[in-house]
Amino acid sequence: MGCGNGHFLAAYCAEHPEVRYNKSKVATHTIWVQDRERNEALDTAVLCLAAYRILPPPNLRHILDLLAKTPVPGSDAPAAKPARTRPPSDLDVPDDWLEGRR
């Protein structure tokens, strides 16, 4: 499913809401009608939005500590850390936090 040729937007717009009415022509509920067979883009967008609203913000320091303790596949010794080019702050992450994991 590529982005460049419209498949993403087609999958993102694969469903639309329709209002259902009773015999007295009063709106009772809304249903989602599927227009296209595949709608993974819409499902993924809804899942990401729900996770963003439900989950707490990630603790980046804890994640970085875990990554630092994890051995890098294929290396026996840790690489030397390069010198920092700017002063650290509370929001900064180490310059080499992704080294060996790309």
Image (cartoon, helix red, strand yellow):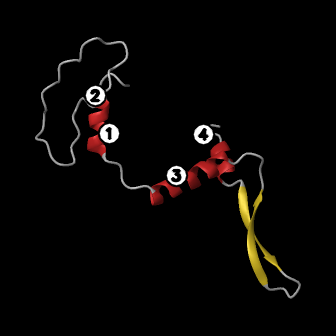
Q: Residues within 10 Å of mark 4 (few under 14, many from 20)?
A: few
- Left/right placement of residue 93 relative to residue 53 reads left
Check contact, mark 4 vs mark 3: CB within 8 A: no
Q: Residues within 10 Å of mark 1 (few under 14, many from 20)?
A: few
List the residue tagged with mark 2. 69
Instruction: Report the mark closest to the observer, 4 or 2.
Output: 2
**C-alpha distance separating marks 2 and 3:** 28 Å
Mark 4 or 1, nearer chain start? 4
Q: Position of residue 101 (x, y in %)?
A: 36, 25
Mark 4 or 3, nearer chain start? 4
Mark 1 or 2, nearer chain start? 1
Mark 1 or 3, nearer chain start? 3
Q: Nearer the viewer, residue 5 or 56?
A: 56
Q: Which mark is residue 4?
A: 4
Q: Residue at x 62, y 47 (%)?
A: 41
Mark 4 or 2, nearer chain start? 4
